[in-house]
Image: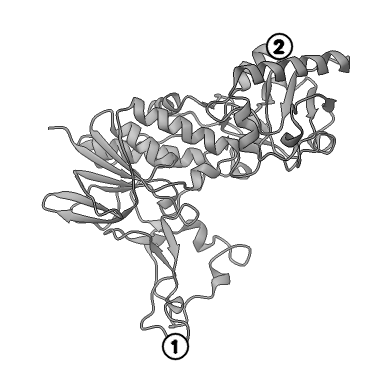
């Protein structure tokens, strides 16, 4: 009989775990709502980009399959160079398909579109990005109110083919007026929400067009949500909109109980609710228990947001109790006051394939930002989800950890 896998969390790690597990098992994904994946800026990395090696690591076949299912990301073998709204040209392992990768046009001039959008200063960005970036006047706004329209709302307007065609006509006119030869055009975050529209715009304009990296909470996060929804439906994953509150043993299976009171039984569970930012881990020091008296007992400053038989830790060991009822000084937990800070590393202690440590019955896995000591990056979360999903649904060898690394 086919195994049944329950995935808790609908971000990039949970999505990757569900899609991968669905190849060999039936899958139920419990989605508690918006998390850190929706804050994605569109640049995707395996390790923090300031620590990235000069040579891009190859992707495993399983990771590539999930990326193809999402159908909205470019991960070239050579890596990518993306432009940020902070004026930095930075390497990335890959990017949302709406972003402009300037690596293929390294020797050409890139036009930075002046368009009157609030928060977009084409002249300042062109100076910051380098001498081959040149500000170009273009009509991008069709209505007065679009000057201050939030990026996601403005980007959604270009889901419409007629509006995208209108934009392409204006950009071609701007190129003709400029009298210069350009290899690409970069715009503010604006090219679609349902899907990335950069390729369609590029074909109509006749040269590569794409977005710069914007602020968290912009169009790339919404494009991920749309891509996730399509991919989960295509993989026949049952998706429930509810919040898990506990994971407990029920005979020889695991039971996930939700906020709505429903109970879902499965052979294995993948926890992928995110870390501190995504809501999977809470900052809850003992001294916060009561306002005016000593707390009843000391406890670690962090706890899991649901009840589950897993161990929180960092640096390969469980979180320690503070030596005082007044808890741990908050400044000792986070940068810039602490190097290798606890808040950057704390999570569920797990094996390489995501199997949570210290569980006698096994078959509980963790993925993404919820895992202790793991890189807090988009592609690392996807890879961890792939590994956990394969192990949760796979044979004995996979559950023992025989899933290839991404690198």
Q: Position of residue 21 (x, y in %)?
A: 29, 34
- Viewer-side residue, 98 vs 163: 163
Residue 334 horizontal/vertical position (percent): 56, 64
- Say whether disc 2 or disc 1 marks the residue closer to the N-terminus: 2
Nearest the camera: 86 or 242? 242
How far apart marks 2 and 1 lie (CA) works out to 69 Å
Along the viewing direction, whichever of 34 and 133 lies nearer the viewer: 34
Residue 8 on image: x %, y %: 33, 46
Q: Is residue 262 above or below residue 57?
A: below
> Are circles 2 and 1 on residues that touch, CB within 8 Å?
no
Q: In percent of the image, x 67 and y 12: which residue is there? A: 204
Q: Report which quarter residue 13 is drawn in.
A: top left
Under circle 1, the secondary element is: loop
Q: Is residue 58 above or below residue 46?
A: above
Does the image show residue 398? no
- Is 94 placed above or below 38 here? above
Disc 2 target residue: 206
Identify the residue position indicated by label 1 in the image.
Answer: 293
The quadrant where residue 9 appears: top left
């Amino acid at each position: 009989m086919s195994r049944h896998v329950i995935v808790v969390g609908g971000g990039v790690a949970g999505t990757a775990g569900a899609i991968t597990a669905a190849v060999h098992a039936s899958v139920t994904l419990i989605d508690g709502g918006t998390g850190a994946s929706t804050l994605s800026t569109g640049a995707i990395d395996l390790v923090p980009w300031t620590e990235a090696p000069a040579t891009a690591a190859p992707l495993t076949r399983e990771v590539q399959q999930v990326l193809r299912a999402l159908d909205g990301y470019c991960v070239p073998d050579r890596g990518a160079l993306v432009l940020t709204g902070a004026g930095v040209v930075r390497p990335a392992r890959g990017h949302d398909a709406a972003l402009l990768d300037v690596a293929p046009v390294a020797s050409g001039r890139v036009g930075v579109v002046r368009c009157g959008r609030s928060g977009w200063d084409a002249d300042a960005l062109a100076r910051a990005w380098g001498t081959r970036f040149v500000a170009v006047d273009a009509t991008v706004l069709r209505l007065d109110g679009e000057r201050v329209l939030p990026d996601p709302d403005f980007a959604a307007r270009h889901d419409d083919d007629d509006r995208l065609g209108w934009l392409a006509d204006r950009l071609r006119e701007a190129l003709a007026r400029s009298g210069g030869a350009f290899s690409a055009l970069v715009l503010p975050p604006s090219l679609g929400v349902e899907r990335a529209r950069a390729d369609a715009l590029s074909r109509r304009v006749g040269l590569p067009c794409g977005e710069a990296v914007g602020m968290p909470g912009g169009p790339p996060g919404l494009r991920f949500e749309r891509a996730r929804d399509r991919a989960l439906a295509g993989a026949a994953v049952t998706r429930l909109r509810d919040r898990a509150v506990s994971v407990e043993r029920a005979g020889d299976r695991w039971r996930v109980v939700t906020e709505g009171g429903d109970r879902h039984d499965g052979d294995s569970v993948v926890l992928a609710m995110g870390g501190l930012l995504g809501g999977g881990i809470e900052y809850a020091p003992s001294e916060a228990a009561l306002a005016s008296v000593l707390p009843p007992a000391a406890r670690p400053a962090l706890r899991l947001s649901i009840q589950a038989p897993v161990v929180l830790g960092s640096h390969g060991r469980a979180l320690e109790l503070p030596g005082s009822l007044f808890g741990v000084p908050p400044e000792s937990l986070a940068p810039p006051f602490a190097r290798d800070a606890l808040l950057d590393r704390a999570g569920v202690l797990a094996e390489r394939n995501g199997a949570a440590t210290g569980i006698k019955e096994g078959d509980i896995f963790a993925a993404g930002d919820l895992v202790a000591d793991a890189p807090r990056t988009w592609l690392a979360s996807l890879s961890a989800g792939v590994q956990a999903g394969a192990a949760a649904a796979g044979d004995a060898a996979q559950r023992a950890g025989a899933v290839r690394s991404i690198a």
